[in-house]
Amino acid sequence: MAVLSVVSEIFPLIKTGGLADVAGSLPAFLKPEGIAITTLVPGYPAVLAKIKDVVAIHHFPDLFGGPARLLRATAGSLDLLVIEAPHLYDRPGNPYVGPDGENWPDNAIRFGALSAVGAALGLGEVPAYRPDVVQAHDWQAGLTPAYMHYRSDGGPRAATIMTIHNLAFQGQYGPEFLERLGLPPHAMGIDGIEYYGGIGFLKAGLRFADRITTVSPKYAEEICTIEGGMGLGALLRDRIGDLQGILNGIDETVWDPSADSLIPGKFDRLSIKPRRLNKHSLQRRVGLPEDTETLLLGLISRLTWQKGIDILLESLPLILGTGAQVAIIGEGDRATERAVRDAVAAYPGRVGCVIGYDEELGHLMQAGADALLLPSRFEPCGLTQLYALRYGCVPVVARVGGLSDTVIDANEMARAEGIGTGFQFAPASVEMLESTVLRVAALWKKPALWRRIQRNGMRTDVSWRRSARLYAELYRELTMPEPIRLSSGRVA
Ligand code: ADP
Ligand code: GLC
């Protein structure tokens, strides 16, 4: 079975967040299930620089303003199709914003092109590669099912899945893009791609895909509500029978504390001691005094409203009152970055930070911090708590989305049963974070109990195994021939 994954970022070629980790790690786990995933990505400079075994398999004379080639290539064990279109993707900065931090003004066209190529493949227009299923990830790939709908001549086509990694990013653009995107005028309706008077990329995907998935069962429930639906709740409720939450897993070879080349002290569940080397190294890197005895609370994430950084900053006086240190690594909104720097200045030696994106520090945080704070207001899945579990860094999470599905609160009963793996709190508020950190600090003073929670976490299966099976089942279901209904109503 051939599945085309359409996505705007993929680790280790280009990454701004968890989407890249998922796109880069899932294919290897589907291979044993007999599923061959090929990933379609834009040819950003970072991607073109790293791909191997490149063969051009198709030529688009005019892909939204310039010629383009479709390259078949590999990167490690990943099979790729890369869109080489310099007029769209040969730019500095990350996939979405220029060096000035602003979104590229033609992002509708850049990701419309990604979706259009995905659709051409899904419709079987590229003889060299014909997928059975097309899986579109997030808004950047959202027009794929819509293009397939409007361009289909009724012939055989791939089945489609729209996967939501984050409903907060919807790809909303003005109606003036309709023609440039090559969509027909009648698409501009409520039953089409129209969204609040403009064009909705994610809306279009949710409207036209055969199935919809998101990255945790809890988030699948949350997005069908008015608040969690962020404008798309009614549409999602309409399609609830086609919606499924499948939890993300992690690549345990990239995230393996016993063989991680990015950390000084390797360790495993039976010998956690070397963690202290990592703790000291992390303390040095963020500008905190090296100290094994002090509880080190970490946070690593995009610095945005979603992640509740402001909640943490407001809770600092009480948190620091417990004697703990706080280490923050991240980049994001300029205002939030400034607020973090201000906190470091206000509490020298107690709060440390690195503002920036650094994969190595991502590993050091998990391997060195005692606990990881995730006061997210919403979290479709979250990967850092999964890395934390694997690295004996105790996750302290708001009870939302995938955080709720992956961390077992070490409450009285869970401790009695020996199954707690972290701490949960709700709602994501200053008061609840504060009282939870008090609970964390109290437990930290009982090393045997703390170590138990660490070990429970390290024993948790955070791999893709279970979820890969669920994706495989979904792909198979979608490609099964239509059942023949007998007149008795039974299915043959
Ligand atoms: P999201 O995709 O919403 O940002 P996830 O938890 O799914 O959240 O994934 C975030 C990914 O990005 C993780 O791999 C995390 O380690 C990484 N990450 C986030 N911020 C940084 C940073 N400043 N430096 C290095 N890695 C980071
Ligand atoms: C999004 C979400 C995050 C999720 C990631 C990968 O960026 O914010 O919760 O883990 O996608 O699915």
Image: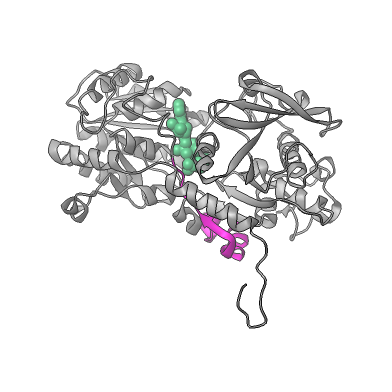
Percent of width and height locating residue 67 = 83, 27
Task: Please give left or right for residue 439 compared with residue 245 in the image.
Answer: left
- The quarter of the rendered structure image containing the C terminus is bottom right
| Res. 36 in view | yes
Q: Is residue 236 magenta?
A: yes
> Total marks drawn?
0
Task: Please give left or right for residue 217 compared with residue 63 in the image.
Answer: left
Q: Quadrant of residue 366?
A: top left
User: Which region shows up in magenta?
Assistant: 223-249
Residue at 61% from the left image edge and 20% from the top image edge = 50
Task: Please give left or right for residue 322 compared with residue 336 in the image.
Answer: left
Q: Is residue 318 magenta?
A: no
Residue 368, above or below 417: above
Colour scheme of the rendered structure: one colour
Percent of width and height locating residue 418 = 19, 49
Percent of width and height locating residue 110 = 73, 34
| Res. 314 in view | no
Residue at 34% from the left image edge and 52% from the top image edge = 426
Q: Nearer the viewer, residue 317 or 289?
A: 289
Residue 445, above or below 236: above
Percent of width and height locating residue 298 = 33, 31
Name of the residue lying farthest toward the front: 492
